[in-house]
Image: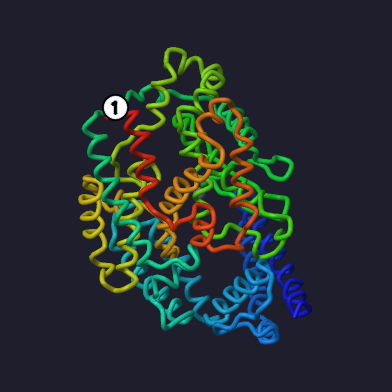
Amino acid sequence: MSDAIGAMRARDEIIQRLGHIIALLDWDLHTYIPPGGMDERSHQNALMEGLLHERIVDPVWDELFAGVGYGEGKVPAGLSEIDAAFLREAHRRWSRQTRVSKDLVEKIAREQALSQAAWMEARKTDDFSRFRPHLETMVALKRDYATAIDPGRDSYDVLLDEFEPWATGAQIDEVFSGLEKGLKDLLRRIVAAGPPVTDFLEKPFAVDKQDAFGRRIQEYMGYDFENGRLDISAHPFTTTLGPRDVRVTTRYDERNVLSGLFGNIHEAGHGLYEQGIGKELRGTLLADGTSMGIHESQSRFWENVVGRSYAFWEHWYEDFRARFLEQLSDVPLEDFHKAVNRVKPSLIRVEADEVTYGLHVIARFRLERALISGDLAVADLPAAWNDAYRSLLGVEPPSDADGCLQDVHWSAGLFGYFPTYALGNLYAAQFVISMEEDMGPLDDMLRKGHPAPILGWLREKIHRHGRVYSAGDLCVRVTGSPLDPGHFLAYLESKFGAIYGF
Ligand code: ZN
């Protein structure tokens, strides 16, 4: 059996390398490519994707799985934990990709290009009717896609599997119901307490100084520039180009100093996860975040729990203020910290704060689940969206451009992606409880400016395991219980109670 697993590992190594080459082409596409290079790049990308796909669906995998007696509920006995995880993930990848016909894959790819172009136009002109036929086609295609993979399962769950493997819509729905109630109650009290002063943040902050401070914080977090780098792109992202090459990007806006800084911290949080994958997993399909929710737990832990905490700024504010005396010389730490944590119900998800963010996600999760199940017709989406915003956030979208047309995801067919954003916050809060049980208060470490034990704990408990454990199993292993939104709500209650004085 070890021969057969060895043969699979050798094949997987090539698949991983091809994936990293595609990631490099993609990284360049979003950072340094000159406009003239775009056209050839799209051909290069299509060629590489084709080569990768051939390797993944190669019929030899069928023989190899049969050779070790794996498949249709059968798992060979006596496997190591890592080999068992390797087989589970290799089989999942192979079966998902072989069940979808080439014809359907091509149809979806074509429709993605058309649908995204129509979405951009519809958003620009605030005209949902231009996007509507494309979204109808995309919903139908993604249903076909889910049915092809597993006709016996709920379609939304099959789609969710791509982002949050082994989770179900029903589980998430239950978690989100508890979250909704707690967030709405907290938000009501925050709004009643009145807004903090934030005008000093609206002044211009020089971009080169933002970059210098952002890099300093990434180093402090432990992001390894010997095995990574930071560049600029329109939308920040993290990408792995090889076992020792994990890159992050950010963007800076002179008029929004927090967006650049928290982008730096967020992406470095993702980068630390990928840089911390165990040596024995590197270069294999297990060398990845186990789910997008867990990946987001890492980025959001550093961004929100660390980067927006009072203890973090107790250590860093003097340094930050010295770089921006013109803007901050008369702003005390307390006021700065309050401004960094301003909570305000708004229309736009990407600008949302820690408290309202989850409500934006809950709206999208419910709507996309209803679109896929057929309970909600695409034609009724704008009205359903506005109802959801009224009920969850108490705001009224004045237009579809600031309503159901604001995100790119659905035009790209990415159904099942949204919930992972909120799950990240929930997982992070639950992990912190265990971290503090093991090491004492997080704030003590942050106040001293010593985050090394924090990173050490994350490496040991989460990063090094890559995809060996599913998100649900990892959560139980690390914290002793399944995901419970109560921990996140308790964290928010204590933090925002102190800031807003209730
Ligand atoms: Zn992220």
Q: Amino acid at mark 1?
A: Gly
- The residue that mark 1 highlights is 501
- Which quadrant holds residue 54? bottom right
From this viewpoint, which residue is outermost toward the top?
A: 330
Q: Which of these two is toward me, 457 or 138?
A: 457
Point 37% across, 56% down: residue: 121
Q: Which of these two is toward me, 172 or 15?
A: 172
Q: Which of these two is toward me, 262 or 497?
A: 497
Point 54% across, 76% down: residue: 96
Q: Secondary structure at mark 1?
A: loop
- Which quadrant holds residue 376? bottom left
Q: Which of these two is toward me, 169 or 28?
A: 169
Q: Is residue 279 left or right of residue 36?
A: right
Tell me where residue 111 appears, x and y as whole percent: 45, 70
Point 71% across, 58% down: residue: 282
Q: Vertically, is 386 above or below 170?
A: above
Quadrant of the image containing the N terminus: bottom right
Q: How is the image coloured?
A: rainbow
Does ligand 1 reach within 8 Å of label 1's beta carbon? no
Tell me where residue 374 appears, x and y as whole percent: 29, 74
Tell me where residue 61 appears, x and y as whole percent: 67, 81
Q: Is residue 63 left or right of residue 135?
A: right
Q: Is residue 338 left or right of residue 391?
A: right
Tell me where residue 459 appears, x and y as whole percent: 63, 47
Quadrant of the image containing the C terminus: top left
